[in-house]
Amino acid sequence: MASLPDPAQPRITAGTREDVPEMMAMIKELAEYENALDQVQATEQSLVRTLTLAGSHGHTNPGYAKTLILRLPVKPNHPDDKPEGAAAMALYFYNYSTWRSKPGIYLEDLFVRPAYRQRGYGRMLLQELAREVVRIDGGRLEWSCLKDNTPSLDFYRSLGAKEMENWVQLRVDGRQLERLALGKTEALQTGARNEHTGQVLEVKDRPGEDTRWISGSY
Amino acid sequence: MAEINTSSYTIRYATSADVPVILQLIQELASYEKALHEVLATEQSLRATLSFPEASAPGGFTRGYAKTLLILPNNTSSTSTSSEGVASSSTNNAGATAAAEDKVEDKVEVAGMALFFHNYSTWTSAPGIYLEDLFVRPAYRGTGFGGALIQALARECVSLGCKRLDWSVLKWNEPSIKFYEGGNIGAKRMDEWMGMRVDGERLEDLARKGLGEA
């Protein structure tokens, strides 16, 4: 690695606590772009609490995902660029391949601010992530793409990515996840009593819904 | 909590002492898929990369990339004539306590495992669980052990504040997909998404590109 960063080049660093406000802004911008701003429940506080951030004193707080921030050059070429302004980010976590017993990286979010597109910043972030996979003696760099997003699919293929055509992802979330966690036995559905605490598990019907809402502690 | 002890099975986290069994299960699964030669994992590599419960460690687990739940049959239950737990995955009566620490597992064969790691959802800034491997030995199939493991992960999600339980399945595995989409589990298919992967030489190429370039 070069000992001194080139002031005319963008810099990629691990996200720190100081970067969190910019991360929050970019997350909202991405959501807005997808007409889903109301779905963003994240706040700066929740990001600090759940992300692994690089500390200013060299230590990291453990969290569930890491980030890379790409900042504009110290000496930008483009007159409208703010020196060292945050231009792009990647959010990722480590996954695992059992058969090779090797970690990998799953890229959850990749976002380049519209003003800075077509400069290769997305590619740079993916390259940095590929280097991170190699660094951890990992085997794979993975992410997901909407099937109808042809431009993105073409771009990813140009980087050497292959499509996992034979697989489909399954998900349990929301109330279905709670129902699965609580169990769907007949006993629970008819209002059984928790045999250890004696508490009655209530079953409430919500008007207009055909599924039963199960409450009560486990 | 994922760990549970019912009249028909016990689910507990694998410790480093279980690594030989974990490797056996991995090899059995690969063998079943006619891909045993693709398993490069060894006991040593598993021990180095998996996470195991340890009371003194932060979060109660050693550092590692994935955790493993094991399911063991409880054949020595006093309610052996009970018909519960035969076909349904929801055999855990409410309030069942965590597995006892006496070494029942030394005498009882492991029936299956679920290997998983945490993923993350940015918009909710909440973790989730990604189930990487689910395997029940053929001798124990049809008794709801697979569903019980999935349900254990759902409990873990709720207790950790995870918002999602994800996994992947081969598209032509219709029986499995039907089971997962069915009423006991209620999974939905993320059909509009395509998984992308860079590995092998392409990964090395991508890592090498761009060094020293604009």
Image (tube, helix red, strand yellow):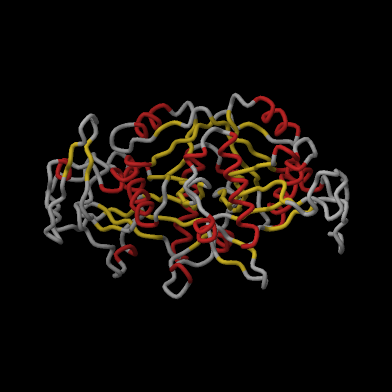
In this picture, residue A7 sits left or right of residue A40: right
Q: Residue furthest bottom?
A: B56
Residue A158 versus residue A57: which sits nearer the camera? A57
Q: Which residue corresponds to the image point at 20% horizontal and 53% vertical from the top-left?
A: B94
Residue A57 versus residue A97: which sits nearer the camera? A57
Residue B131, placed above or below residue B103: above
Residue A194, placed above or below residue A185: below
Q: How many marks?
A: 0
Residue B90 picture quarter: top left
Residue A124 versus residue A69: which sits nearer the camera? A69
Q: Which residue corresponds to the image point at 70% horizontal and 54% vertical from the top-left?
A: A132
Q: Measured from the top left, where is residue A30 in percent x and y?
A: 60, 40
Q: Which residue corresponds to the image point at 63% horizontal and 31% vertical from the top-left?
A: A163
Q: Measured from the top left, where is residue B95 in percent x and y?
A: 20, 58
Quadrant in which the N terminus of chain A is drawn: bottom right
Q: Which residue corresponds to the image point at 48% horizontal and 32% vertical from the top-left?
A: B190
Q: Is residue B132 visible?
A: no
Q: Measured from the top left, where is residue A209 in percent x and y?
A: 24, 31
In this picture, residue B38 sits left or right of residue A195: right
Q: Is residue B3 visible?
A: yes
Quadrant in which the C terminus of chain A is drawn: bottom left
In this picture, residue A77 sits left or right of residue B87: right
Residue A105, placed above or below residue A171: below
Q: Measured from the top left, where is residue A115 in percent x and y?
A: 74, 38
